[in-house]
Image (cartoon, rainbow, N blue to C red):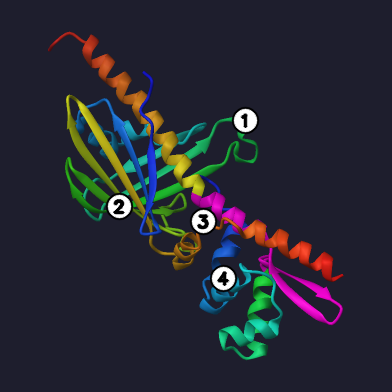
Amino acid sequence: MAGNAMASRVENDRVLVLERVFDAPRDLVFKMFKEAEHLRHWWGPRGWEVTFCEVDFRPGGVWHYCFKCMDPNQGDFYGMESWGKGVYKEIAEPEMFVYTDYFSDAEGNANEAMPSTDITMEFVDLGGGRTKLISRSEYVSAETLKTVMDMGMLQGITETWDRLEERLYEVN
Amino acid sequence: MSGTNSSIELATLSALAEPNRMAIVELLRDGPLTVGDIAERLGLRQPQASKHLKVLSDNGMVKVTADANRRYYSLRPEPFQALNRWVDSFRRVMEDRFDNLERYLQELQDKDRSKPES
């Protein structure tokens, strides 16, 4: 299995779009997102294990999850738990669903200080048992973060700072 | 999402939530300025500009460098780099997940194929 490469791009300056083709029929790929017993197997990032996962897959329903870092090579993250909460906004099985992703605590309270993200997952049937998954993430609650991203992902800040240093040395 | 919500990023986000402070950061991207320059360009009174600069400075986003008789405000890159990493971490997390999902789907389908028809 060589693996299909992920494509990514930014739309409208603040929507992060990720695309990936899977060699599996659409119904099956969709099922991986709506059933907790499946999510447990793959939702954790590399080195992180899903230790809690509850799904109420309907509009307004809550998806509450936790993953824990099991990889000693990840330094400070090792042993750290990260709780997240999704609230489903719209479901059109098996074509797409939309949810808002929050940082949360173990009780499922959203952390309002951190930005929430509106995520749309779209499943495109490519035929021949292949499915294209398109994920669109839009940062919604932190106006700031949008602005930060609009600023061009902050490239160039360091250069500006370096130029300043030079200038000040010249002045002194 | 990943467990990267360190305090520096929270401080950065909350300090930038005020529009004048965001405007100051945008101005400073082009180079260092004095409080007088900043007040003038944003149409603020100088004490107001000083107040916002103090918040930004308390949050480690701005630093002051004194030249003979002038004080220049400039951006410190660290908090912005931290924010940038945070945004980027989201992309990497999703990529990890999709890699896992691909493997998992493969396993499921292989298992299915080796199972006798029921």
Q: CA distance from mark 2 to mark 4?
A: 32 Å
Pointers 1 and 3 in contact (C-beta within 8 Å): no
Q: Chain of mark 1?
A: A
On screen, residue B22 versus residue B75, left or right, reads left
Inspect this view and state whether residue B1 appears: no
Q: Quadrant location of the C terminus of chain A?
A: bottom right
In magenta, the rendered stretch is B59-87
Residue A48 sits above or below residue B86 on the image? above
Residue type at tag 1: Pro
| Residue in the image at 59% along x and 71% along y | B25
Residue position for label 1: A72
Disc 4: which chain? B
Residue at 18 percent across and 34 percent down: it is A125
Disc 1/disc 4 C-alpha distance (Å): 39 Å
Q: Residue at x 51, y 71 (%)?
A: B17
Label 1: which secondary element = helix
Give the residue displayed 42% in from the left and 57% down from the top. A109
Question: Residue flagged by tag 2: what amino acid is it?
Answer: Tyr
Whether labels 1 and 4 belong to a single chain: the reply is no
Position in image of residue A149 (x %, y %) = 47, 59
Task: Please identify the quadrant where the N terminus of chain A is shown.
Answer: top left
In three-dimensional space, the C-alpha distance between marks 1 and 3, rounded to whole angstroms, equals: 30 Å
User: How far apart are the alpha carbons under marks 4 and 3?
Assistant: 13 Å
Disc number placed over residue A153 in the picture, else none = 3
Task: Check whether the beta carbons of the residues at disc 1 and disc 2 lie within 8 A of each other.
Answer: no
Q: Nearer the viewer, mark 2 or mark 4?
A: 4
SS at circle 3: loop
Q: Which residue is mark 4?
A: B26
Q: Determine contact: label 4, label 3, CB under 8 Å.
A: no
